[in-house]
Image (cartoon, rainbow, N blue to C red):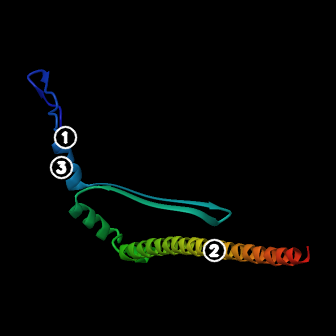
Amino acid sequence: MSITSSGGYLDRPHSSSLADVLTVILDKGLVIDAYVGVSLLGIQLLTVDARIVVASVDTYLRFAEATSRLDLTKQGGRPLTEIVQKGVENTVEGLARKVAKDKTKDAIETVQQKVEDVVTTVAEKVEGAVSHVMDAAENLVGDDDGGQD
C-alpha cells in the first residue's frame, strides 16, 4: 500500500478486505514465541514457555522445523498419547473407586437391614415363648391354689 501523487492529487491507499489480511497472515504466519523465567538467588522458581501461532499448518510446520520445536521430548515434554493414556487411567481408576465404595455401602446397608430383621424376629419369638411359659406357670400356680382351698 503506497500513497502516490498524480496530477497534484494524492491517491488514497487501496483498502484490503479482511479475507486479504487473513490470507497474508496465514501465508506468512504470525508467531509469538515467549520464554519467561523467574528465579530468586539463582534458583529457578517459574518457567513459562509459550508459543502462540496464527498461521496455516504448512507455515507452522516450516517454523517448527526451523526452530527444532517439533520434537517435544527433547524439551522435557511428553507425547500426547502418554498424556491421554494417563488421563484415561486416572478417570477409570477414580470411577472404579467410586463404584466399589457405592457397592460396599449398599452391601453394608443390606446386611444391616437383614440383621435387624433377624433380631426383630428372634425377639418376637422369645417374647412369645416367655409369654407362653408365664401363662403355663400361672396355670400351674392357679391349679395348686385351687386344690388347697
Label located before the other in sequence (1 or 2): 1
Question: Which element type, helix, strand or loop, lies under badge 2?
Answer: helix
Type of amino acid at the residue the image marks with label 1: Leu
Type of amino acid at the residue the image marks with label 2: Thr
Question: Which element type, helix, strand or loop, lies under badge 1?
Answer: helix
Are the residues at dot 3 and dot 1 in contact (C-beta closer than 8 Å)? no
Quickly name the residue at label 1: 18
Mark 3 vs mark 2, foreground winner is 2
Numbered label attached to residue 83: none
**Residue 29: x, y in percent?**
26, 55
Numbered label attached to residue 121: 2
Question: Which element type, helix, strand or loop, lies under badge 3?
Answer: helix
Quickly name the residue at label 3: 23
Are the residues at dot 3 and dot 2 in contact (C-beta closer than 8 Å)? no
Label located before the other in sequence (3 or 1): 1
Residue extending furthest right?
A: 148
Give the CA distance from mark 3 to mark 1. 9 Å
Are the residues at dot 1 and dot 2 in contact (C-beta closer than 8 Å)? no
Give the CA distance from mark 3 to mark 2. 84 Å
> Looking at the figure, which quarter contains the N terminus?
top left
**Residue 76: x, y in percent?**
46, 74
Number of numbered tags placed on the structure image: 3
Give the CA distance from mark 1 to mark 2. 84 Å
129 vs 21: above or below: below
Label located before the other in sequence (3 or 2): 3
Answer with the quarter of the image where residue 44 lies. Answer: bottom right
Residue nearer the viewer, 85 or 76: 85
Answer with the quarter of the image where residue 101 lies. Answer: bottom right
Type of amino acid at the residue the image marks with label 3: Thr
Residue nearer the viewer, 117 or 54: 117
Q: What's the residue at 13%, 27% (across, down)?
A: 11
Q: What's the residue at 33%, 72% (across, down)?
A: 70
